[in-house]
Image (cartoon, rainbow, N blue to C red):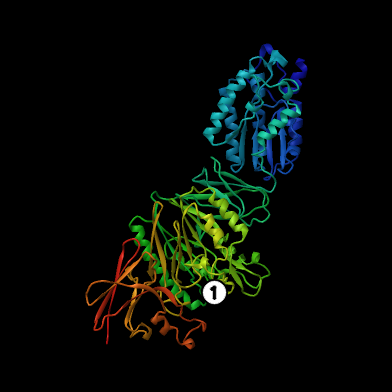
Amino acid sequence: MKRLILTLLSTAAAVTLAAQPDSLDYRGDYYFSKRSQQESLPVRPHHTVMLGNSLTERGAWAEYFPEAHVINRGIGGDCVAGMAARLDSIVAGRPRAIFLMAGVNDLIFSTIAPEALLRQYERLLDRIAAESPATQVFIQSPLPLDEARNEPYFTGKNARIEAFDRLLRRMAARRGLKFIDIRSRMLRDGKLPAEYTVDGIHLTPAGYAVWVEALRPYVTPAGARIGTVTCAGRGLAGVVVSDGDNCAATDSAGRFVLPANDRARFVFVSTPAGYASPSEEGVVRHYLPAKSDGSSHDFRLRRNPPGETRHGFVVVADPQLFARKEFRLLERAAEDIRQTAAAAERSGRPMHGICAGDITSGDHTFYTSYNEVMSATGIEFRNAMGNHDMKLWGRSHETSAAAFEAMYGPAYYSYNVGEVHYAVLNDNYYIGRDWYYIGYLEERQLAWLERDLSFVPAGTTVVVALHIPTAFAGKDEKPFDYPQAERSLCNHRALHRLLEPYDAHVVSGHMHTTTNCPVREGLYEHNVAALSGAWWQGAICTDGTPAGYAVFEVDGGEVTWYYKSVGHPRSFQLKIYDSKDDEAFAGRVVANVWNCDPAWTVEMHADGGRPVRMERTTAVDPQARRLYADASKLDHKWITVTPSDHYYAAPLPAGTRRVEVTARDRFGNTYRAEKRINR
């Protein structure tokens, strides 16, 4: 029996019960023969390595996990020192993961103290971390014994194994490693039960079945994508990473695993609050190309200064550059944004930017120049895709994002700042015919958003940025307008349902005009006017809104906003017209209050008299009508004025010489304008 047990457990541990050493000499013929065989089969980055002694060696790991590229590096009789001696050939291959089962032979066949053994064990871990830092290490608990099956050698050893188990648990927690508790699954009445063992330590098929089930959640299948998220060399826990379909959160060491996915083009990180992804040439690099060779996707973030719960963001829509000559106008707008952002940051409010799509009019070679100009704003911009950012004339929607993604990465993604979760979507759906598209979110994107939001607590403020607007007042009460399917999101209800648990804001563009729409309690859409005005043909949009951008100020989860016109102060929020400007306004004063919503109040004072409440109405802006009346003077002959409902009107008393209009927004800010009435 003595010879049998020694052969099974420790071919290197030819010791006597009376004189056990304080360490094991693993250097036997079997060890070197097996090691040589294993080293002739190199470890690769896509491999998962089972590293251990005879318990590991006897496991049919490749058959247990046929899709996971598992290789067996168990050697009968091996100890912690022996595993360390053969570690070089393992870490040289930078394997995806190592599952470590070590220490039982040391505890049975030597007198080494569990604390001393732990120091050996940790030196082995230090080497893995130093030489293959992307490798995920799993610590497996040592298995119990049935001491009665071999009393001379096993007596009292369960106590030593239990003591070492406690040390391993604490060490794994301290180092941020996953500890897999197999021991408690096999322990019954203080020992390894008979149905799990052939000799008191080695396992039956039933015993291996228990072990396999314990490992199953952690063994990565073939094709899965792995990686890390770190800051200053330390892993970040709880960071959400995605491949466009699946989402996973990093563990305590900053490691993540995404399941196999043939559709993935990118792996991207939902940049967590308090951190920033690197920027390069005006593009936030929160993504990496999806790798298929098993190598690691490693994201390195930087820590933001504290205090970003008080932050802000700028939304620009439809820069839509058509010609090189328009870049000088974009530079003027960028300088205006720079001044706005700098003033906010001086007041302790860090800023970032969002472009709601249509960066160019179709010439995607402009992207690099656009990025250079917008970098002068001094803030980082995240970009949504617009219909003019699509690669058209292809055979399907799936090919339409190629140019945008080549420059900016995934067309949908998320990130976090302070207490706010931001999601950027692509709701431009190319139908595979000429240049035609509709506003539509395909199921893949909706399913991704649902998974992304599953990591966001209910009640959180969520900002969704996309190009084609989702809501207009009363839209759901009217029949669906098929000819207008490219002007708003056809399946907006699906998006709105996903946002129900949150305090949500949608920011959009596309229309080149302004519409603010409180959809319901907890959901508000801001359809932002074009930064380009009327496609850079004039300083105002076709509804009279000045070319500009929206500015949002965030305090905790509370969001306020205003519209900033390029070249004008923040206080410029309305224009006044009368019959001299448009005969349709005869007998009335009409104010264009472009950023209004139903919560605004607008009043007129005639010659300093008592205020008269103005009523909201629909009108055409007289200045826009004059600017865009002669198509021969415009580069784009199709430009025409757009009626809008952000006007307020009141009767003009006879003989009035001067009127003042006061507009008060939903936050109590008051804006004024006045006009002399020429009779």
* SS at circle 1: loop
Quadrant location of the C terminus?
A: bottom left
Position of 3 relative to 346 (above/below): above
Q: Image height check: is 546 above or below 237?
A: below
Residue at x-position 50% and y-position 58%: 279
**Outermost residue, left direction?**
608
- In this view, the residue in front, 183 or 483, is 483
**Residue 11 appears in the rendering:** no
Q: Which amino acid does label 1 sit on?
A: Ser
Say above or below: 424 vs 197: below
Q: At 45% across and 86% down in the image, what residue appears?
A: 629
What residue is shown with label 1? Answer: 361
In the picture, measured across the screen, residue 605 lies left or right of residue 544, that is: left
User: Quick check: 472 left or right of 667?
Assistant: right
Seen from this angle, which residue lies furthest top? 18
Residue 220 x/y as whole percent: 66, 43
- Which residue occupies the foreground of this view, 6 or 229? 229
Residue 46 location (% of width, % of height):
68, 45
Q: Can residue 407 be seen in this view?
A: yes
Residue 78 drawn above or below residue 578 = above
Q: Position of residue 572 (x, y in %)?
A: 33, 71
Of 140 and 519, which appears nearest the observer?
519
Count the marks: 1
